[in-house]
Image (cartoon, rainbow, N blue to C red):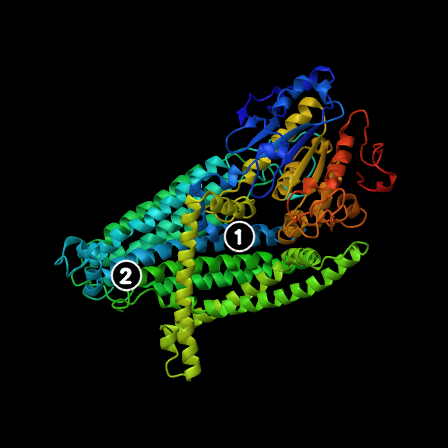
Amino acid sequence: MEQAQEPAGTGTPDAPGPGDGGDGRAGTALELLVHGVGGTTPADMLDDPRTVRVTGDDVAAVFRRTEDADAESRPEDYRGRPVPEAYVWCNLTSGNGTRALWLLLLPFMVVNLAHWMRPTAEGRTRTVRLYGLLVRLAGLTLTVLLVAAACEVALDLVAWQCAGTRRCAERHSWLGFLSPTMSDGGWWSAPGRRLALAAAVPAALTGLLWYLSLRTWRAYESQQPIDRGTGPEEEPARNALSRPGFWYGRRLVARLRAAHTAAALLTVAAAVGVPAARFDRRGGGPTPLDTLGWLLTAALAAGAVAVVAVVCRRGRSERRLDRALDERLVRRLPLAALLLLAGALLYGGWTRPGWTSAGRLPGDTAFGGLALAQGLLVIVLAVVAHLLHRSLPDARAAIRGLGGPAVAMLACALGGVMSGGVSQRVSDWLDGTDASIDGPPVLLTWQASVIPPLLVVVLLMCAVLARHTWRLVRAERAAVEEGHAGEDGDPGRTRRIAVARATAGLTDRAPLLVAITSAATLLLGAAALVGAMTTDRSPADAARGTPAAVHGAAETAQALGSWLIGLGFILFVTWGRRAYKDASARRTIGILWDVGTFWPRAAHPFAPPCYAERAVPDLTWRMASWTRATGGRLVISGHSQGSVLAASAAWQLEPSARKRVALLTYGSPLERLYGRWFPAHFGPAALDSLHTEVDCWRNLYRRTDPIGGPVRLPGASGPAVDRAPLQDPLSYGRTALHPLPAPILGHSDYQADPAFAEERRRLLARLRPEVPAPRHTGRPESVPAADDGPGSC
């Protein structure tokens, strides 16, 4: 695609533009197109193979047709028609192969989503803050869990168990220099030195997470939104998405990055120092080492308290554009943790005669404490979410306001499965079938054993949903036949249309599936924790002496769970490798991030970056610069996820600029997904405020669309925004207009429907300066009187 210089009218909002000269440019209309999930090309969006980039970079940019590149200098050519532009943002989420590695950050992304699923509340400031605090603490436990899993693999399984066992070390000759027998008591064979050397693995993982978070912050969160200031027209924000600092989380991300980095380093230091300190506490040991052990333990505890205190501090600063950073905290906290790690390595590597590695490192207590903390946090979070939901009930909110706690529970389960999967696979690789080492902590074995019953619950739910869908198919078949009673029947086509409608409705059943899966995960996880802590044996060993059916079920669950968790981990890694090499698979993963990384990193700094912190300011700057420079109005047209970006950008505009914007959404998940799962930000009140603040809003959807749906505003606002469901397919049988069978479009190709062109014309008619139509006071001649009413378009 060609590139062109940025037109003069696309600079900062306060800069003078080409429309300020009284030469007739004022009032020129702009149509800004925003694509949805998966992305597309500017040529497809503008329906012209010749396009130029007018502003932006290789990551996200605005394009025009070549013939429209200098539209500002020829306003007379655009009387009665808009200047079309396309905002292309797909490279923000699916640009290069390295982003496939972000799959490893999936639990962090999921817990970050839980932060934004808070129920709607009014006048409950402390409770809202408590909700955010609990999610941030849950995110902190996930960081500690990931690093603890790396310590379990590198320090416990490899350096402590395998290198300390002759049979295991002989199987892996590369461990010879760490083995006391194979190296004949070499310098590195001392247990503390083996642990200190192996600590390089989790420390490197921590450094990688810190680097990725810093690098992605520079590419995403460093983009500053418009600083609207406190002008006379500025009004109190009716929705959090309209606050000036909502899309600028630099300060919080930097603070959380420092805290999580310090927590990870302290976890590694504890994994090295605590075993040495426990050995030094035995009678007869050197007193200086025992004293150093106590001092190190106290320092680690103080560091942990400091980390938790930082995480518990106030969260995001949204009411203003906060450019300040906590420089001392951001620098000193990770540095202090790094110094403690260095001290722990020196302390652990000191010579201790008679110290040998036997059994496991004390990992059961650590993993058990993490599991208990996560369970308690989720339970308290559910109580807080219930109180918030009860204060301002929303009938459409997912799981009656408990969507956040349910998703937080799934994030913790994902972290546990990934940790257990890595540990189990490494243990099997090191030991094979020799049973020469004890393997991972007992709790991880119990957690793997509850996976089969959890899958049974999920499969039963899927069976119930399948039965419900089949009933819907039969009902939809009757509705399709009734809707086309005057046409020749085609059972096959009727069935396909009915199936498309019924399966599209499964999206509305997702909250039930998530709720039951989360509840089952919590109960089974609690059972696994109790079983591991009370028996200190694997499920199969703990069931010895019980009835044969119980013992057989325990053995089957343990073996099958270990196999499933290993298979899942292998599939996870394989998918990531394939996505790194295969562009089509990489595009699929990019689509996952389109949905999962829309929200800023408010709960976890190591989550994949928020692309909306680049896209929303881009769109806001573009719209504000156009309306201020030319005095013209603007239609922003968004498909799928693009409609969410369009609405978010409209909220960020000043009130006067917002009144010059018309919004056209199609295939939009604004209410169906975002309104239900994120009610505090996209609930009925927020969407209704958007409708009243923009010039006009029209929404198109189909009953066969599994993602898009109606906005469902109450009262007369509903029909003013939502058009009746579009017909899909456009023609049931062959007609003169459609001589070939029309496809079932579902979520795609809304522009192919004549209704799209009709709604587009209606909105553009409002933008013509010669036919003004301000809200409630007038109507373009092309708009039928029957559409009059509150917010009528």
Above or below residue 718? Residue 759 is above
Q: Is residue 414 left or right of residue 82?
A: left
For the question of whether residue 25 can be seen, the reply is no
Residue at x-position 67% and y-position 48%: 743
Q: Position of residue 25 (x, y in %)?
A: 72, 19
Badge 1 vs badge 2, beta-carbon distance below 8 Å: no
> Pointer 2: what residue?
430
Q: In this view, does 323 lie to the left or right of 643?
A: left
Amino acid, disc 2: Leu
Amino acid, disc 1: Leu
Q: Where is residue 144 in the image (x, y as percent from the top left)?
A: 40, 54
For the question of whether residue 492 can be seen, the reply is yes
- The local crowd at label 1, few if under 14, some if 14 to 19, many if 20 or more residues have their Cα within 10 Å, is many
Measure the C-alpha gap from mark 1 to mark 2: 40 Å
- The local crowd at label 2, few if under 14, some if 14 to 19, many if 20 or more residues have their Cα within 10 Å, is many
Residue 366's tag is none
- Observer-side mark, 1 or 2, equals 2
Helix, strand or loop under label 2: helix
Determine which quarter of the picture holds residue 51: top right
Residue at x-position 66% and y-position 46%: 668
> Pointer 1: what residue?
133
